[in-house]
Amino acid sequence: MSRRPLLDLPPWLAHALRAQRGPVPWSAVVRGALAAGPLLLAALVLGRVSLGVVAAIAAMLAGINDRPGSRRASVKRIGVPALAGAVGLCAGTYAGQYTGPVPLTLLLTVLGLLAGGVSAVGPVASSAGTQVLVAAAVGAGMPLPESGWQRGLAFLAGAGWLLTLRLALPTPGSAGGDFRFDGERAAVARVYDAIADLLAAAGSAHAEDRRAALTAALDQAQDALTGPRLRRYASSAAERRLHAQYAAALPLAEAATALAWAGEAVSPRAAAGPRRLAAAVRAQSTTGPLPAPDRSAPALRALDDALLHAAETFDRGDGRRDLHTRRRTARQLLTAVFGRGGREYGLRVALCFGAGVAAAQALHHARWYGQHTHWYWLPATVVFLVKPDLGPLASRVLCRAAGTVLGALVFAGFAAVLPRPEGLVVLVAVCGALVPIATRHFAAQTAVVTVLVLALVMVGGEPQASVGRIGETLLACAIVLVVGHLPLPGQRGGGVRQRLTEAASAAYAYLTHVLGEAEAVPVPVATPVTEAQAKVGDRAGAGDRALRWTLRREAYRALAEARTAIALSAAELPALARHTAGTDEVAALLERLVDTTTACAVHLDDTGRLTPRHTRHLGELLARLEEVGERLGPTVPAVPPLPVAA
């Protein structure tokens, strides 16, 4: 007898109570303990407490961005926001020193507009937008004796210290090999495990979830391997080997997706080969003999050929180093910043941040703050609350309010008994160690960060202000709730619709490439794809397949990002969630279209023509997409004309 939940919670409340799970990231915990606390202690010893406070704040913000992954990826994930934060700190400092309340509010509002638009580019840009605004508020609202450029250098030093720890310290389990590539190696191994899981789930109800997990594993491996390096191409034997092993996984992933699309179970031995490949990646060894699947169907033959190719690549230790990624052009970046998603988010950030600065300035000049003059907390809190990538609006507000109250009360208790400044330095170190664990839930992260920041500013000379911080946080929550529900020019849900448009464009580009590059003619999508379109000829060239895999990766990655945005929007309050209703249906249709296109590509490689089942599915999906597009408006680009063979 199944147990029914006691409460059927609404999505916005269920999201607020949901936390991420996983093993404790002990390496990140160690780095957190060695970051803010030791920096603050060194500043106390040197007599530069205010600079130590700035460096510790930077280390704390860098710790929030210190997520699992490769060292190479961490350079971009931590370094770019740190640079943005240093610029924001300098700008905020000079603006606070040389402008009055009204010009300062206007300047920071414009900065919020720019940072909000840039945040639409991607996760790293979003983190950079957050740090530039938080640092600008701190620079303008935290009076310190140092000049703006000195604060900026201290900020870079604090973030740079944590990044140095990330690059220098080995992670658990890497002592037996080259620890420089432990994150990359683990990411590539997870790709092969995900392929095996998808093969094992073929023909079952879990196949769709396993395909999504494979997409996530491929995205993570790409991110792990494509970080910054001194040279354009891999420069060491170990790195070249990992690149070749990643590239060898792509035809396996394609064949596994085609088998899952067919909806028929495959032999268990089909999954045994990718399992052995995953073990070989982790052990940095050759594969040995691999159990080959039977070759009774095109997708099985493609899987067998891909296994043979992977075995050769692993034994040779070198091969193709193409990661099948393309840099976004300047036009694409500008479209993301100034498109409907960037405009909507930028305007909302600007209104919220500007209102937070104006309210903080009014309270500051009305001397509501009492003995101290630090007014940065209110606008800085607004920045975190207005971030959609931290969860739905109602969830963010609830978690921020609860976390701040808890953190402020906990700090008030510690401040009453701990010796100063030694006890506060220890408290900062402990909180730094807890940040990587607390990032699993926004309320827990808020509580830990609240304790850490209150300890830092008390070391810097500010009196205990837990009650004031609670009041400012609640005011920030009210501001964001009001502004978040204001009607703005244009269509609501712009961020979701922009990502869905990008996903649809990528899916159509992939479909067009697979069906051939002959002259395109209009085809009624309400009818199945014609026989002429099925005869696309042989496209077995290596360059063509490389482009195909690149387009496939772009399509699945764009769909995964759109799915994430849609899920967050669906968990908003009904007044906001209704603006993106129906977009999940579009995403599901696009995913099925990309899956079907992959199955078509595998079949075309084997036979040179499509079966009636492939053409029927393509026609039905395109017809359904056109129908949904007409109902939802400009959410989905028009279905393109399909190519036919000359």
Image (spheres, helix red, strand yellow):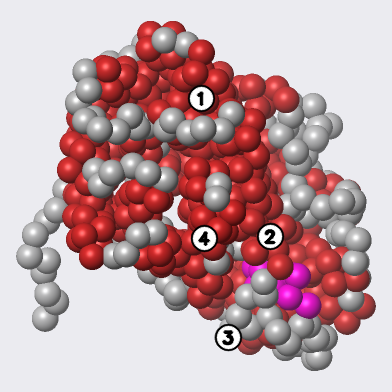
Mark 3 vs mark 2, foreground winner is 2
Say which label, 3 or 1, has the lower sequence index: 1
Mark 3 vs mark 1, foreground winner is 1
For mark 2, what is the residue? 164
For mark 4, what is the residue? 41
Let me know if residue 187 is in the magenta part: yes
How packed is label 1: few (under 14 Cα within 10 Å), some, or many (20 or more)? Answer: many
Residue found 39% across the figure and 59% down from its top = 421
Residue found 26% across the figure and 58% down from its top = 415
Q: Position of residue 552 (x, y in %)?
A: 67, 48
- Describe the element under mark 3 as helix, strand or loop: loop
Q: Nearer the viewer, residue 390 or 3?
A: 390
Say which label, 2 or 4, has the lower sequence index: 4
The image shows residue 114, relative to residue 27, as above or below, that is above
Residue 573 seen by the camera: no
In which image quadrant can residue 205 be found?
bottom left
**Main SS class of the magenta portion in the image:** helix
For mark 1, what is the residue? 92
Question: How far apart are the alpha carbons under marks 1 and 2?
Answer: 27 Å
Q: Position of residue 56 (x, y in %)?
A: 51, 51
Q: Position of residue 323 (x, y in %)?
A: 78, 54
